[in-house]
Amino acid sequence: MFNNWQTPNGMSRRHFMQHLAGSSAVATASMTMGGAIKANADEMRKNGKSAILLWMGGGPATIDIWDLKPGAPTGGPFKPISTTGDLQICEHMPMVAQQMKHLSVVRSMSTREADHNRGRYYMHTGYVPNPNIEHPSYGSVIAHEVMDQRPNLEIPPFVSVGGASAGPGFLGMAWSPFSVTSNGQIRNLKMDLEDNRLLQRMAALDTIETGFSKRTRDLPASEHAKVLKKTFDLMTSDQMEAFRVEKEPEEVKERYGTDRFGQGCLLARRLVEAGVPFVEVDLGGWDNHGGIHALFKDTKLPQLDRAMSALVEDLNQRELLKDTVVIWMGEFGRTPRINQNAGRDHWARSWSCVVGGGDINGGLAVGETSSDGTAVESEPFSSEDLMTTVCKGLGISTEKTFTSKNGRPMKIAGGGKIISELVA
Amino acid sequence: MTRYSTILTAVLFLGSLLPLGKSEAAETVVPSQVTMINEMIEQGWRDFEIRPAPEVDDSSWCRRVFLDVIGRVPSQSELSEFLAAKGKDKRAALIDTLLYDDKYTEEYASHWSTVWTNILIGQSGGNARDSMISRAGMKKYLRDSFARNKPYDRIVFDLVTATGSTKPGTDNFNGAVNFLIDKVNEEKGVLATSSTSRIFLGQQVQCTQCHNHPFNQWKQQMFWEFNSFFRQTRSLRRFVDGTRDIDHAELIDEDFAGEANDPEDALVFYELRNGLTRVAYPVFTDGTAIGVSGFVSDIKRRSELGRMMLASENMDKMGVNRMWSLFLGFGFTKPVDDLGPHNPSSHPELLAKLSAEFRKNSYDLKQLITWITLSRPYNLAPVLGSNNEIDDPSIGEMPKFSRFYLRQMSAEQLYQSLVTATDATSQGSYEEQERQRNRWLQQFVVAFGTDEGDEATTFNGSIPQALMLFNGDLTKKAISTSGGSFIDRLSKTGKSPRDRVNELFLAGLARRPSRNEMTIASKLLIARKGKEKEMLQDMWWAILNSNEFIMQH
């Protein structure tokens, strides 16, 4: 590898890094990306699929947003309004209502995990937590699956904005979410060193890594080499411009909302435009055991309404929505019964998720719940079903099977069934 | 003659290393607990027909035990002192020194206080401006406890029963209250219930708040019975005069009238899934009930709980399982804090026997550490070979402990190790250093936005961590070449660049460079046009960024 020891910058960097990755002891097949040069990268990027997950940490009361029960004792004070789709939603979401022709609500979500950690894991992976195996999150899986449409992507394929998302499991650290704050600022990005010297330092580092990896023969050592490569790419890439959300015009920032979620959604749009396959934007604070309706009306729903509507509108206007699936969900819903503190507690048995974009039909309400919202009265859907449908909407084969490190075959998205109304 | 003088040197050396009166211990036989661990672990290897990795070399082991016992890598002089020592008891002697020599007391206490602070209040507990927790108070209580080697059962009792103020320097300060201070007021003390049972008894009950657990012996009734022990307890905010800023908080026990407003019969209600309401009184997990009065003068519910926890075998097992996992990388169960019957253990008999020994020896944490670090599994090389290929817990296999599992240092260990490796002179007061360290650590914490304060870390081998080590301030400081810096001082020692590169590797990786590594150093020296300090800087950067540096191995 030291043939390029003194070669100048420019094209040698990529070449060099391939050597670096290839020479690390347990070279794996997945290190081949960037190998084949595709004819027209821009064209490929345009056709590349992406997904944006709006993650509602804490478990939002979907009965107050997407599946209202006016008049029922469980219904709460909000009224439904009509939308541009074939369904009604909460009156405090008027701008999203204008975008509902692009989005569908799955009202018959029925899951079993009503603990935050378990629910978050399940909704992010399609599997219940199992101490013996770490399942890859949907973000890691989708990034992994569509990466070959992105030969020139130099920034991480899975970005988590303002939150932690969930890990890459057995796919390895190279597919873990890259966590950034909603203003897109990335710590420790600049080294202020000439490229050549950085390369030479990397070469010294590689020598140490290779020796260690050979001696221990353990996996973490070879995983590290991949992360180092991605880190190096990112430090030296022009594509990092995508993170500079502050460059957007003021009026655009205002439209999304200048709060963290609004700016996060704006950042998500920029990242998808740059070709990032999976972006998760977090909006926490949905664990509303008390005082839920005042909070929804004054704070939570206006914030969500502004950012989510601006995002869908922009994606559509830029002709990105046909290739970008947008998902809105939390770890579970909340009890139809309103508790003594005017709040709602954890509830997984009957709740809603929202999905649209890509090849997914918008404007629909899929499934229904009983008149008080406590039970699903049509075919129930799971995290696996929703994600299988999302994969379908992204053109990812739902027959794909992964092999976990212990040799166990695992179907993509937990082998769920396709929600046929959404992709017919 | 030669043989005699070797022994003599060893005895003299050990004598000088150990406090008086301890030198005998180093000469005595291996503790029976160590033999027991070895026999049971070796039995597992025979059962699975695997052969363990070879014993780890002295310098790697030295680095390993420094990291695990006092939370940082050894300095060059500490390492060379250990390597120069002779005798087959030298490992035991080093453990003794790290545990009992006064010069390490502070670091020992500080390391374990950090570990336990993260377990008890998370990585971010007390950092928000409106938090009732005083992180400094939590740490102070733990530091004092570990410095005095307070028995584990006493620490547990303190944390569960404490009353007083959170913040050092306030009246009635009792740092132990910080564990429960933000877990009792909201939602009827649900967090106090689930944290106490999980952390100290290895029982995961958070789901049973709302329903019977499908594969856990805990029932919803048991949750609320356990919860009843915390219902006399309140947290009170104390504000900075004339503002709404919290200065500190106080944890108190007060009379509890129960939810039916009858303190003589202080019950709590809970709701079944089908909407029916049931009542619960304080009953421990083994079915032992205490009086139903809510008057503090009649009965202090948390004290009763503490006493029953101390009598419970689960507390012993949980303590041992956690300590084992902190040293070996995996516990006997996964997750480490779930000891329920639904969750099988890799070595159930060993866990039971070691727990019994822990209790018999008065919950002496330093003895437990001695047994673990002297045991054979802890002294193996980190090598996955053809003879123990199946021993790979990272893919879901039960650990067989036939090799030392690689794991990443904690962020705190990395921080302390960088300080040690660069021989950085501490600047500012203890509080100022703590603030700096805390600020640095916070960059890795990501919250999940739930009421339960769940959080994750990006210090997990991902890109943000790599960026920090590539370019962060801490690295910049560590590789600085300015006057008085580590590189600057190093450049003035030794006879040749080769000597100095050797020193660099010893300081960072506790070993000498390989031929390839020396070759690349000489190439770097040419590339830097003979400026040796710059070459050392480049090599040092590479060492600090290597897996070999950031891994415990």
Image (cartoon, rainbow, N blue to C red):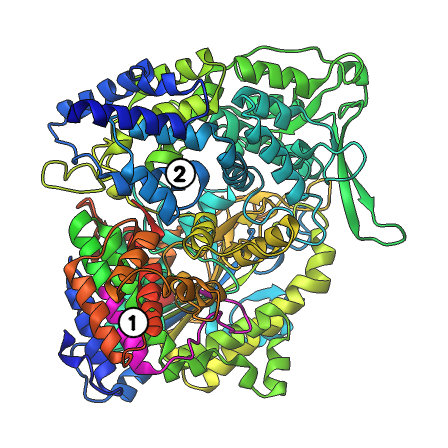
Q: Nearer the viewer, residue A195 or B336?
A: A195
Q: Determine which of the numbered discs, if any, sits on residue A201 in the image.
A: 1
Residue B144 visible in this rendered orientation of the protein: yes
For the C terminus of chain B, give its image quadrant. Answer: top left
Q: Is residue B456 magenta?
A: no
Q: Determine which of the numbered discs, if any, sits on residue A242 in the image.
A: none
How many residues crowd around disc 2 within 10 Å: few (fewer than 14), some, or many (20 or more)?
A: many
Q: Nearer the viewer, residue A29 or A289?
A: A29
The chain letter for the residue carrying disc 1 is A
Question: Dividing the picture into quarters, in which one does residue A177 lie?
Answer: bottom left
Q: Residue at x 13, y 23 (%)?
A: B46
Residue denoted by label 2: B68
Question: Dividing the picture into quarters, in which one does residue A95 lie?
Answer: bottom right
Q: Residue at x 43, y 48 (%)?
A: B410
Mark-to-mark CA distance, 1 and 2: 30 Å
The chain letter for the residue carrying disc 2 is B
Q: Nearer the viewer, residue A276 or B5?
A: B5
Question: Dividing the picture into quarters, in which one does residue B281 lie?
Answer: top right
Start-end of magenta stretch: A178-206
- Are labels 1 and 2 assigned to the same chain? no
